[in-house]
Amino acid sequence: MDLLIQLFSGLRWQDIVDILLNSYILFRLYVLFRGTNVIRMIMAIAMLWMLERLAVSMGLIVTSWAMQGIIAAAALIVIIVFRNEIASVLQTRNFKSFFWGIPQRQIQTPVDIIVESVYELARRKLGALIVLPLKKGIESVVQSGIPWQGKLSREMLLSIFWHGTPVHDGATIIQGDRIVEVAAILPLSKRGDLPSYFGTRHRAAVGLAEKTDALVIVVSEERGHVTVFKDESAVTISDNIELARVLREHAGEADAPAGLTSHTIELGAVALICLACITGIWFSFARGLETLVTLEVPVEFMNRDPKMEIFAASASSVRLQLSGSGTLIKSVRPDQVKVKLNLANAVAGRNQVPIARDSIALPPGIQLKQVDPQALEVTLDLPVEKTLPVQPDWTGKLDAGLILEDVRMVPDTVKVVGGSLMLENIQTIYTEKIPLDGIATGGTATVSVVLQPSSLKLEDGRANRVDVIYKVRKRPDAAF
């Protein structure tokens, strides 16, 4: 749970837009290419990519390299082999359906026209081979077809299969209400259990039905019988009513309400899968390109009692180790990272203030890895004034024949400002070190006052200098 909170807490609004936009693009690709071989190849490439990322995480260098090559080759193969499917999707969609329209599961096919045409062909004993694809693409198994793109009609079908026309021997492919291809060559079945009266058209229909989910209608030229092939079954149609029922079941019209429900469930599930995939890819890239940086950030103290002042702190800045993508880390400005410690509960004296995560302000997308130090010692106190005597701090020794007779300080006292607890135990202020070596006669030395601890201050406007006036005389016994 903590890991999930850490991952999602660094999301910027730009990252959310990035994930949603690419999820929608992936969803649109599925909607546009649904039911074709292109979408299956894209799903296969996606599986290969996930395996490649798994190999990278496991440190399998050669496997990762090989998978990258396979993915690149597969992407090229999709563009070359399925260029016709891709072109048909890009060319036949209008602006609305291309970007946000949701097409129905099956384009409605005029079943009555097909039924009437098939039985007219059977009555005239005109051999025919009609293909109605469903979801799986048939482009990879159908060869040498002639693009037609004509509107489906009884007259059109009769003219295509009429004796003597150049295209009457091949298969005619119908999608929706249009004849998209004629004179297509279908793969022949190699099954040995087919009836002996099955001719080339029947074997071609069985071959296509075995490899795709298309429905194939065959009209026998010799006997005038109508046979429908789907999957591994072959059904001899007795009348036009039965043929209409089979065609409607194939097109999904017989259970339209149930089909609509499953259609909605399918698209909803795909949308969630697309969102999950893109989110996983985003986190994979975001964590994989993680960069670490260490910044020295000054500390700001907030909400202290206005009657008290900060007289000491164990540190004025902290070191933060931050992580994020290289681009975000490079764009971080010093003023975007702040450390603010709340002193609302601090009391007079020493306070141990922890540096919590909520005390640190970071730009979106940047994660905190480490803080050093993790707490600061802050001394607060009520500021007071105290007058203290000044004493010289002598060092060294006078010549053996001399005596320090008199010492006078000007001024002899100073007014010091500091914390009440601190000044309570201080009775004297000393000057800086005054060496006695080399002093032979009396004189005046101007020296600085040493304020210990450093948080002590002289009252406003007071110079930090005093005069030490001293007298030196010879020892009485020095002449003997």
Image: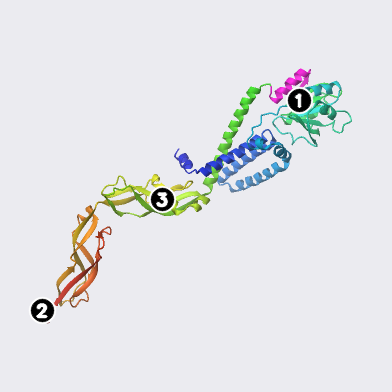
Lateral position of residue 41 relative to residue 404, left or right:
right
- Quick check: 129 above or below 304? above
- Quick check: 414 above or below 324? below
Picture residue at 20% right of the left edge, 57% below the top? 386
Q: Name the residue under label 1.
A: 229
Residue 147: x, y in percent? 79, 36
Q: In which quarter of the image is the N terminus?
A: top left
What separation in Å lies between label 2 and label 3 (alpha carbons)?
71 Å
Residue 461: x, y in percent? 26, 63
Q: Name the residue under label 3.
A: 338
Q: Is mark 3 on a helix, strand or loop?
A: strand
Is residue 435 in sight in this rendering? no
Question: Is 468 in the magenta?
Answer: no
Q: Which residue occupies the foreground of this view, 385 or 160?
A: 385
Q: In which quarter of the image is residue 170?
A: top right
- Quick check: 35 above or below 282? above
Picture residue at 44% right of the left edge, 51% below the top? 336
What's the magenta region?
Answer: 233-253
* Amino acid type at mark 2: Asp
What separation in Å lies between label 1 and label 3 (alpha carbons)?
73 Å
Q: Residue 477 carries which label?
A: 2
Mark before the other along the chain sequence, 2 or 3? 3
Q: What element carries label 1?
A: strand
Q: Quadrant of residue 21?
A: top right
